[in-house]
Amino acid sequence: MSHRLASGGRLDRTRRLRFTFDGRSYVGHAGDTLASALMANGVRLVGRSFKYHRPRGILTAGPDEPSALVELRAGARREANMPMPVVELFDGLEAQSQNRWPSLAFDILSVNSLLSRFLPAGFYYKTFMWPAAFWEKVYEPLIRRSAGLGWAAKEADPDHYETRHAHCDVLVAGSGAAGLAAARIAAEAGARVILCEQDFELGGGLLLDPALEDWRAATVAALARQSEVTLLPRTTVFGYYDSNVLGAVERVADHLAEPPEHQPRQRYWTIRAREVVLATGAHERLIAFPGNDRPGVVLAGAALSYLRRFAVAPGKRAVVFTNNDEAYDTALALREAGVEIAAIADVRPAAVRADEARRAGIDVRSGSVVTGVGGGRDVERVTVARRNGADGESLAADLLCVSGGHSPAIELASQSRTPLDWSDAIAGFVPGQPVQRQRSAGAARGIFGVAEAASDGATAGRAAVAALGLGKTEAIALPPAVARAGTPSEPFWEVKASGKAFVDLQHDVTTEDIRLAHREGYAHIEHAKRYTTHAMATDQGKTGGLVGAAVLAEARGESIAAVGMPTYRPYASPVSFGVIAGHAVGKNFAPVRRTALHAWHVRHGARFMEAGMWMRPAYYPQPGEEKDAWLSVLREARAVRRAVGICDVSTLGKIDVQGKDAGVFLDRLYTNTFSTLPIGRARYGLMLREDGIVFDDGTTSRLADDHFFMTTTTANAARVLEHMEYHAQTVWPELDVQFCAVTDHWASMSAAGPKARLALAKAVQGLDLANAAFPFMAVGDAQVAGCPVRVFRISFSGELAYEVATPAGFAEPVWEAIMAAGAEHGITPYGVEALGLLRIEKGHVAGAELGGHTTARDLGLERMLKKNGDYVGRVLAGRPGLVAPERPRLVGLRPVDPKARLRAGSHLVAAVGDGQSLGWVTSAMPSVELDCWIGLGMLSGGEAWHDKRLFAAFPLYDEYVEVAVTHPHHVDHENARVRA
Amino acid sequence: MPVSAPEPRSPLVQALKPGRHGAVGARQVTLRAYRRSLVQLQARKGRAADLATAVRQGLGLALPPPGRAETSPTLAAIWIQPSAWLLCAPYLAEGDLARSVRAAVGSAGAVVDQTHGKSVLRLSGPTARAVLETGCRIDLHPRAFAPGQAAATPVGHIDCILRQLDNAPSYELIVASTLAEAFVDWLLHAAAAYGCEVLPPD
């Protein structure tokens, strides 16, 4: 049975759109929402409620909808909790009702309704407290099964989401009469204007009155002509942050089955506005009475929307329940559309509009209320009685239109820290004095009526233009004011009668729940909110929030102004996770940093690992090694120990330091001295944090008297530069020192192993690499394959090694030339895994030991602390706790059983089962020199344990491995190889 | 026997294949990689005025104030941080720009070659601003940003030195070379809705 009116509405009746709801097919038109199309098809039961699984219908015609929530689309695009009135209909739309099992009409958990006596507010806290062990196994799964609404898709979202940063002179939120007028004034003054409207059509309330269409269309067209105006329909402003930054979501392709190619599904706007006009309109309020949640109960303004905009009659015979004049417009429009008006129940004792309606033949019952609703899953009868409960009469009706008045939509104003003032005139909160550069206009500040709102919007637009200093504004055409006698609305919140009266339909919060919260001590509005979950659902209490506050105020015996509203925070309306993530998902989560040799590594089959943003080769599997990465890692490490290997070390931080005080600057940053370093030499340096803990290490070379080249660890490159900036700018601003990062300018590669000199000597021109001419820690310029290089004789592996740096554009020819020169010696590329193995064998500390908890002494590096002169961290490194003899110190570890595996993270204990940890294993790897696992560890007592035995305990695997404690240098204790 | 240096390789040559990307239509932008020599120039302590004089006399260019760039027929100087500029010139030979700047400024400034450390791109066309807005927080509207202005700001989560060149508008984008490929990935995706013609490198 169609409820579609024969004419009218803003529909394109030539375009029929097919859609399904719970598997049944229906047809709507272009211009419909899912709500209007279902209503036109006579569908009224559209969901089950959250807690009691009560039948629910469509209450509103906008984003304030608490009840009519659906799962939209299917498969990977399925989205839960979509309010039907904001779902724009498209051909092929699929929707499913939520929170029902096995079906919407027959829902097993509606038994909760009968158990409601045992499910009061705060019942989770009361019922599920004991026994504690039940939480994980019983209570939580139970709550999760029965609570919650829809289900999100489990597959990855196939659509793309975009972010966009916008700037404007004036942001106008809302395109009703006030918003359009404000935007037009600002646009005519030449301002850059962004106008956001959550609906797919601009106009707000103007869309409900054909008489206003000319003005609406002309104003929108005038705005569209302005090149500096951006009109954003389908765009919800959800957040108002400091410095006039606002967040908005544009639903670019939500009204399509799939986004067009190269288009995002939604767009996240960050808008920086010089001035803001909030023309967000008002939310119609519900009234709490028994059965106010039954399908067929519709807010009066929403009913008018369905009639006028969507050409749908929401029922056949209606009762209208109101405390204000506006609902009379709905009653008259219903009657005009052929809907019978059973009665108007007006809480006011008398009203001009009541008399007019009576003269028109409508049964108006002044001083009356609705005390109950009859019918199972639908409104069938409505009981109207005097306010004292007398003269109750049950009227046959399938539609109950309710209006409790209008609350300005103050969410954004409040988020901007504007205080809220109580207005007796409209019985609602209105925005007070703005804190940021913003102003509210029209219904958003309690100025109701189209002409009044438009005029107020124009005033707000002029104020914004004046604040911008843009000069004179033009007069614009405004809709004519309609003089009409009226009667003020009467604040009215609740009909006290038997049965559940809801203040929050989505979270099933009743007036009794609010009073219970008050009785149990949760009398503050913020406490009552959390105890009852009132206004905490996805609709954020737009229809009933103030009603709940009013019920609480009565319980407290105070005014609503004194009770106030809970703090408004973003998001004013729900926002999808996808649009928050934007482009930064999957491989785009963070930028990938590639060395100049990346393509070579890819071509040679490297397996990569992430190191911060970097991708570094972990190892290079050769044929036969695919199944066991250890084969590659051990082969590569062996090549370094026995012949020669080459490793891409371009990721190390590199900083160019110049200035006549550069040496002094480095002396103060490092614990050791650099001002005495000869030109053409490198030195290992250690840096502390201000608190005395080891910060970073690396080698720094002197290129000229006033020019140093510093290296840092890969992980700390940016932090070290920051540390230097901080000290140069604020601590020692008198020093003449300039520095900048050159990590990206230089590619560097380490050739290491006993054959390193033989290999390199063949490739390097212009530098004598003989031991005497170029000893350990020497630095010199040369060429490889005609490319400029700088050679550093430094070693991380403990072998004879050279680091060759070249401007990054020459990285491949230099690497290839060294590979070719080393071919006869078996030169082998090695990755980060082998590098880690080699440094553990050598006892060099790295990230696991430099984790921000160790001192120089802990690491056996006390000789690096100079005796004379100050440096960052010197004083605090001397604190008693940092020099305590029992602090864990770096040791080497080897399993007593050569076949046993040592695991990093194991605790060191004196005996199996001993609960007293003496230290822990920081790093572990199989050794290629010792033919057993080896490790480094931090051990209380340190060298006192050398040559003694302990157990490495790994409780996760119930493992105890007996280990011998050694010097950290597992190989070449005398450090002879690097000098060979 | 000395060998002459090969042409240095830019990561953009790998990442930026000439041709059309994304949508087809009149709203497309063009994107091109530029081979440039770059040096970072920093004033020695208390020598900012000397440095400005030396650059004006030796290189024929005024060092620009914060937020701006200055150009001569052969050189551009972009302010990048207090008392520091990035100088940008067509690539001629390895190290040449650094050598000539060093000769011009003498002891008044620290000169660091960044030719290989940074990669230079140019995005051009009526929708270039819209493309950048998807990842750039600063206001590029003609009333707020014009040719000759420059900024150091993240674009698509990657630090970028951005300079407007003309009213096409064209923007020069300078990013760290190790992030150039990631940046191009992002930029081509951001431009896909409008379409992007990648021109052969300059």
Image (cartoon, helix red, strand yellow):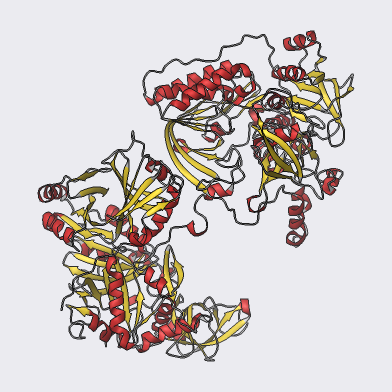
Q: Dividing the image into 4 quarters, which one contains the N terminus of chain A? A: top right
Q: Residue at x 40, y 66 (%)?
A: A715
Q: In the current view of this chain or complex, which residue is farthest to the front?
A: A14
* Image position of A483 with respect to A331: above or below: above
| Residue A406 found in image quarter | top right
* Image position of B88 with respect to A489: above or below: below
Q: Is residue B24 or residue A787 the one in the foreground?
A: B24
Looking at the picture, how far across and down is residue A182, in whole percent?
49, 23
Looking at the picture, how far across and down is residue A58, in whole percent?
74, 34
Q: In the current view of this chain or complex, which residue is farthest to the left?
A: B57
| Residue B90 found in image quarter | bottom left
Q: Is residue A76 left or right of residue A655?
A: right
Looking at the picture, how far across and down is residue A518, in whole percent?
74, 37
One can see residue A878 in this view: no
Q: Which residue is drawn at 77% across and 55% down?
A: A142
One can see residue A312 in this view: yes
Q: Is residue B151 left or right of residue A12?
A: left
Q: How many marks can you see? A: 0
Q: Dividing the image into 4 quarters, which one contains the C terminus of chain A? A: bottom left
Q: In this view, does A732 lie to the left or right of A341?
A: left
Looking at the picture, how far across and down is residue A150, in whole percent?
71, 48
